[in-house]
Amino acid sequence: MLKLHLVNPSEATYKANHAAILRYSLHADLPSYYRTTHLISEITGIELVVHNMCINLCIIYTSPFLNLEACPMCLKPQYDQFKLQLKRGKKWIACQKFHTIPIRPQLQALYHKPESTTHTQYLCEERVCASSQISTERDALTDTAIYYTA
Ligand SMILES: [Zn+2]
């Protein structure tokens, strides 16, 4: 039996599902997480933006903090000092990273095709329908109340 994990869209979830599918079907030709993210990026034009951030979540090392070696709030270093010393100052690895997907390319991808534009109207149409239904039911209740009081 194939058991897939649907906890969240993380790399760990992808790898767990990848392993589960390979256990189920040894001959499945599945792309790696890295390859899948690049395929999605190529198809949608949406790219992940990664910035270094303070290990205590105080700041993100973007302008004006971009060139700081340590957080101005808690003074924790931007880069992993152990790995930096281990590699004799040649490997600068951030203690913490912040991943984000900018909204503009997501919206562009969403409105790329007329069909997807129609799908984005779903919530608005459902809201109008539900609102109309509530009004109708409220009017019916009001009429009923009038009927009983008259
Ligand atoms: Zn900090």
Image (cartoon, rainbow, N blue to C red):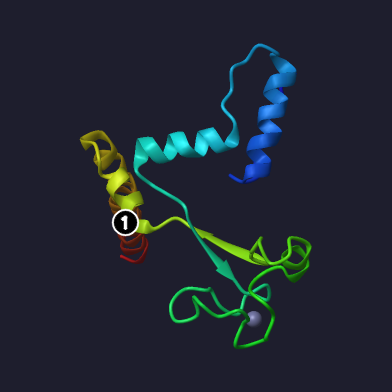
Frontmost residue, 124 versus 72: 72
Q: Quadrant of ligand 1?
A: bottom right
- Indicate if the residue with disc 1 has its beta carbon within 8 Å of ligand 1: no
In this rendering, does residue 3 appear at all? no
Q: Residue furthest bottom?
A: 73
Q: Residue at x 46, y 52 (%)?
A: 48
The answer to whether residue 28 of the structure is visible from this angle is yes
Instruction: Report the residue that reaches farthest toward the top.
Output: 27
Q: Where does the image place residue 49, in percent across and percent down from the top left?
A: 46, 57
Name the residue located 32 percent from the left edge and 62 percent from the top edge: 142
Q: Is residue 139 left or right of residue 28?
A: left
Point 62% across, 46% down: residue: 10
Q: Position of residue 25 (x, y in %)?
A: 69, 14
User: Which residue in the structure is indicated by mark 1?
Assistant: 104
Give the position of the C terminus as an image quadrant.
Answer: bottom left
- Amino acid of disc 1: Arg
Foreground: 14 or 39?
Answer: 39
Q: Return the residue nearer the eye: 134 or 141.
A: 134
Q: Is residue 49 left or right of 144 when viewed as pictured?
A: right
- Residue at image coords 74%, 71%: 81
Q: From what the image shows, is residue 9 above or below residue 33?
A: below
Element on which disc 1 rests: helix
Position of the N terminus, as image quadrant, is top right
Residue 11: where, in percent of width, then height?
A: 63, 43
Determine the image quadrant of residue 131. Answer: bottom left
Q: Give whichever of 83, 56 is nearer the camera.
A: 83
